[in-house]
Image: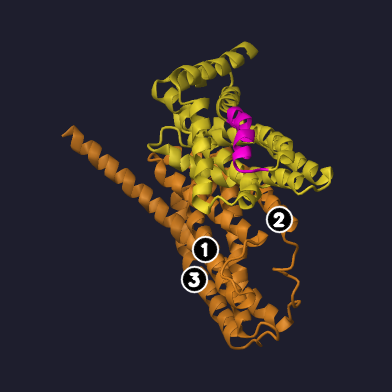
Amino acid sequence: MSPMTSLSASQRLQAFANPARFMALSARLLAPLWVVSLGFLGVGLYYALFASPPDYQQGETVRIMYVHVPSAWLAMFGYSVMAMASAVALIFRHPLADLCAKSAAPIGAAFTFLALVTGALWGKPMWGAWWVWDARLTSVLILFFLYLGYMALWTAIEEPTRAARAAAVLALVGAINVPIIRYSVDWWNTLHQPASVFRMDGPTIAPEMLLPLALMAFGFTFLFVTLLLVRMRAEILRHRVRMLRLAQAAARAED
Amino acid sequence: MTHAFFALIVRDLRLAARIGGGGGMAVFFFLVVVAAVPLGIGPAPDLLARIAPGMLWVALLLSSLLTLDRLFHADYEDGTLDLLAMGRVPLELVVAAKAIGHFLTTGLPLVIAAPLLGLMLNLDVAAFPALMLAMLVGAPALSFLGVIGAGLTVGVRRGGLLASLLVLPFYLPVLIFGVSAARAAMAGFPAGVAGQSLLLLAAVTLVSLVIGPVAAAAALRANLR
């Protein structure tokens, strides 16, 4: 019987908590992940830009969707990764979970920003305005604020362990609040303007449009995971450099 | 336990009354913000009447944010917070007492001052009861969500601005439901519509009563280590 099988689930979780083991494993995973995500994105972009028909109502502008919709999905996915990692960090004190949450935040914020910008670019030809105070737009904007606040808290507290705990608390409170904010914004908008500006039930999506969308969604998701691993590796190296600097300073102080 | 809890609230009230910068300052700030609005957008009475509930709510939010950094800062600096954290009263209850103190010194005076400012903004008198009731229901949520931001940024230099940034997104549901309760009463909607937003506002407040102390105590424990 190998030692791995006799371990309980939480012990197996702990086995992956070893940063050295994580560095070795992620180093082997990175190259295939880059290949897969760039492959999906390349094929997806070809289908999205050339090999799919223009929409009969929206014309060529529908191609913005293939970037916009996956970005919006990843914006929410990023926050859930952050919140789950924060919960794991607070409950199990898993040392990599803090790094995972910290690394997920800028990536999620970037996708949120991309969703907002592509949405504005799409909104101008479709609705005639760069920005509409629509429920969906407003809640994504608030999600962006939550990301920015989370990252600001990380930079504001100098000591990493303190910053990690505080940021994890913030991420979890945010996770409870996201549905409340989402619901309240929906309710606010439907009270004041009935759904005339923005209808998601436009053309039901055709199969030849679904293929590039699915390819792009897979590509974005793999890109997210790849970037997350790159950032986590960078965080571990940053931590090691910090430790070396502290040790160096301590050695110099003794001289 | 209850004795210690009330002693904490009384201590905060006394500090606010004696050092100043408590309720009086918040009301003054509220007044200045509201007075700046007609200067900014013009004195047309019907326009002012239309935006009055939203303006009063935004001013309430701002004055609440402005006073957040004082919640724990002085106690953190002189070590009182460490004593409170080590004491027999659970930190969650300490935080709840602080939040109640914050509500009594900033939220409540503003609610009482709101009708006067409503008159100045030409707000329909019929909307006053609904607006005040909504503010009374919603203002505790501002204090109880605010302690989270204050707890997270305790010991951070210039934490006040950061606390505002962190907390403001959480305030938005309070703002939305609070304004819509007053709006519905103003537009002469049947009482059910205003009542619905009031109930949702009460729900947000109740949720914040639970999340606020727990999250703020966790944040304080992280920051006091």
Side of B122 where B41 appears, left or right: left
- What color was chain B assigned in the picture? yellow
Chain with colour orange in the figure: A
Magenta segment, prevailing SS (helix, strand or loop): helix
Give the number of the mark in front: 1 or 2: 2
Type of residue at label 1?
Phe
The quarter in which the N terminus of chain B is drawn is: top right
Report how far apart the C-alphas of labels 1 and 2 lie in the structure.
21 Å
**Residue drawn at 57 percent across, 84 percent down:** A49
Residue A141 x/y as whole percent: 57, 58
Q: Is residue A23 positioned above or below A207 on the image?
A: above
**Mark 3 Cα within 10 Å, few/some/many (few <14, many 20+)?**
some
Determine which of the numbered discs, if any, sits on residue A113 in the image.
1
At horizontal 57% and vertical 23% (from top left) the residue drawn is B101
Q: Residues within 10 Å of mark 1 (few under 14, many from 20)?
A: some
Answer yes or no: are tags 3 and 1 on the same subunit: yes
Q: Closer to the observer: label 3 or label 2?
A: 2
Of A179 and A102, nearer the camera is A179
Q: Indicate the amino acid at tag 2.
A: Asp
Residue B55 placement: quadrant: top right
Report the chain holding disc 1: A
Q: Share a chain, discs 3 and 2?
A: yes
Indicate whether residue B44 is drawn in magenta: no
User: Residue B152's spot in the image, x, y percent?
Assistant: 49, 36
Across and down, in percent, residue A144 comes to 54, 56
Q: Which residues are magenta?
A: B107-123
Few, some or many C-alpha atoms within 10 Å of disc 2 (few <14, some 14-19, many ≥20)?
some
In the picture, the disc for residue A34 is 3
